[in-house]
Image (cartoon, rainbow, N blue to C red):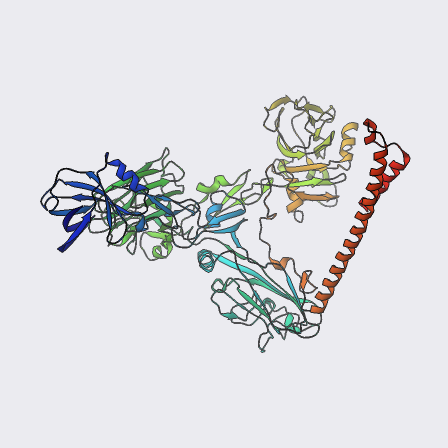
Amino acid sequence: MARYLVRSLESGDHSFSLMNGWCLNMALVHTSPPYVCARSLARSSFLRFRLHLFESTSSQTPLFSFCIALLSAVTLRFCLLLFPAISNEGSFRVFVHSASLCSQSHCEHGGRCTQSWSSFHCDCSDTGYKGATCHSSVYEASCEAYKHRGNTSGLYHIDVDGSGPVKPQLVYCNMSDKAWTVIQHNNTELTKLRASSGSARHLASFNYSADAEQLAAVITRAERCEQELSYHCKKSRLLNTPDGTPFTWWVGRSGDAHTYWAGALPGTQQCACGVQGDCVDPEHFCNCDRDLDDWLNDSGVLSHKEHLPLRLLAVGDVSRPGSEAAYRVGPLQCYGDNDFWNAAHFEKETSYLHFPTFHGELSADISFFFKTSSSGGVFLENLGIKDFIRIELSLPNEVVFSFDVGNGPFEVLVKTPVPLNDERWHQVVAERNIKEASLSVDRYPGSVRKAPTEGHIHLQLNSQLFVGGTASRQKGFLGCIRSLKLNGKTLNLEERAKITPGVRPGCLGHCSSYGHLCQNQGWCLDKHNGFTCDCGASSYSGTFCHKEVSAFFRPGTSVMYTFKEPYELNRNGSAMSSSIYSDLTLKGENVSLSFRTGQAPALLLYASSYYKEFLTISLSRNGQVEVQYKLQNNRDADVFRSSIKNLANGQLHRVAIRRVLERVSVQIDQNMREEFNLSSDVEFNAMKAIIIGTVLGGDELDTETSRLASQGFTGCLSVVQFNSVSPLKAALLYSHNSPVTVTGTLTESNCGSSSSSSPYAAETTHSLSDHISTVGEPIVNARGGDSALIGGVIAVVIFVILACLAVMARLFYRRKETFQAQGSKGEKSEEGPETAFPTEPNARRIIDESQREYFI
């Protein structure tokens, strides 16, 4: 055992002087080679570091180097790495090379830390975060952000504050014209109450799928939030208006009780009908306060964000004889993202916005969108005495993230294959922590650089944060910056831009970046906060014109889209046509549709003209697509048959037909186009109608085609389009204002979708008021207060169960006797191949009786 006197202890940037010395008893164990010690200690969970012993304070070469595992506060165990000859006593200096890294909690958001001899690793699996220290969220911040990545309705995780403390949450994103965030609670069904002799008040609490912190973050970030609330009443007063004490009230997020109802303003003690002035009794501000012995309701939407969501509902007037009530509280629904579209437009290179100092000492993440036509400029900069952090567009296709924490400038850059100054939105994400720095631009490959293993690690800034410009007089930024987030917090660029010369709040022109999300001939329309897809010229619907419009046809179902009669044909009539359509005479068509059927032959589409010209698309007996054009009265129709057979196989197939003058091309699914030539005229004159399904009339058709037309079509038709006309879409979605006539049963279906459908059938958000009238008893699963009724129901159920058990016992007893009788007869017969199939009449009768008894 050797005894040494330690006069000083050094660890990293810190030095500790031991005035009176520190006597250590050390067990010196020689190991060879040195890495054996490091490897064995790496498996230990104790505090580990490397120890160097020097002969004097001026000595630069250590006499000893040790691996140390701290077992307790006073005991040290050493593994000797180098063991030269030395006296047993002396004065030494101790240098701690590497202390326990995992004990410093560098892994964020629940990341699991493991370490080697000189470094540590964070396991971020199942945390919802990523990066070397589990700092950045893997999820988008809102449904709005998911929508602008092209995502459709469905369940998504959102992380409202990114790298902040609020945990990710699972929500339903309803992508309609707006991106709705839907958060469910434990009771969204209509709940019915009856008069009870028990408590005079019914209390209902609502537990949401998100905690209070998550709810507050979603509501604060949203442009608008709302929650449907309805009350159905029969001799059950609601707010006891105009001057009485409310019988019913509700509690919101802050814990305060509210006595206004959905559709009214806070503090008014009114319902929606009181605000609109259409209550059943003008002397009351709620329909239910009329106290009629008939079903009424007060329904509407709560939309005051500070009071949402509804946490508790107290219903009071349900204890009188004959009183009945029902309530429904819908899920919390929010749309819009104030942070995602928060933007500023920098009009001069010398203009900038300034904000308080950015604090990202050990971890910093910065993300934003930009668009510009300039070749370069500084996006943001923050300075310290020596330290700094900066992100800039250095070249049209190069973004640089640079900083200094006291070890000298450190740069990470990303070069893109295309210029970024194209007036389209581009996203930049930069992160810096004690292990590495990373930078990514859009979805191009990012860049990562490891941080130095020694030196300073704290980023110390003290000046204001400059956005769009610099304090170091470098070239400022020209263009738009939006959704600028630092460590999960969004800076309000628009608010500062309103009071800053050379900077305008907001930024238009989103279709240049997001227009490609509008599919199937959808047209992108710019909005102040985002864009929308106009699907008017498309046979598809949905947020991005991506949803197939499909219907199931039965025999007798017919959809007819009618064109106005040309002026030349009705000029002698009593009424003149309001307009003459110039496109009624066609020199070409683009026709497409999808179908799924087992019927062959079958007519898929028929287009007629006022001059008895026509186009038909049908399936022949062997399942081939057959196209007929008759564009000249004195000539027979041109008939073209595709070479693809057996299409009436119940699978989804798509047909695309294109004609330009005499050239006709037909494409089935992904097969090669087939080309044909017309032998008659090339003009389709005076379009009359487009018909899918059963054709009523069609005198110009030949006998076989006329027979098919009268039989109709059985199966699925989807995304039917004839040039700019979508007859099936008009019939299903716009029948009230389209020149379309539907005969028979037409059922909207997802039969035209090649992928599985969403569990949520509709993409739009419907208001409760669309489905509930002012009067009428609600149809619900009643929750009664009558215990006698409940007891009676339970008694009946028990009686039925006992009766069923008795019948089953008798049944099995008789069945057992039957099989015993059958078994005794089988023992008397000789075994052989025929014994499995009894031929005697008695045996056949026994089996038949047994089967009849078994299925009773």
Q: Position of residue 337 (x, y in %)?
A: 45, 53
Would residue 853 be found to the left or right of residue 308 on screen?
right
Q: Relative to 814, is 286 on the left or the right? A: left
Q: Is residue 233 visible?
A: no
**Picture coordinates of residue 723 (x, y %)?**
61, 35
Observer-nearest of 456 and 778: 456
Question: Is any part of residue 522 visible from this angle?
Answer: yes
Lateral position of residue 294 relative to residue 32, left or right: right
Does 593 appear above or below 773? above
Q: Nearer the viewer, residue 568 or 626?
A: 626
Q: Quadrant of residue 686?
A: top right
* Relative height, residue 580 to residue 792 (above, below): above
Q: Position of residue 318 (x, y in %)?
A: 65, 72
Q: Nearer the viewer, residue 662 or 270?
A: 270
Query: Is 373 left, or right, of 223 in this rendering?
Result: left
- Total marks shown come to 0
Outermost residue on the right side: it is 841
Q: Nearer the viewer, residue 406 or 647?
A: 406
Seen at 50% across and 58% down, the residue is 225
In x, y percent, where is residue 697?
78, 36
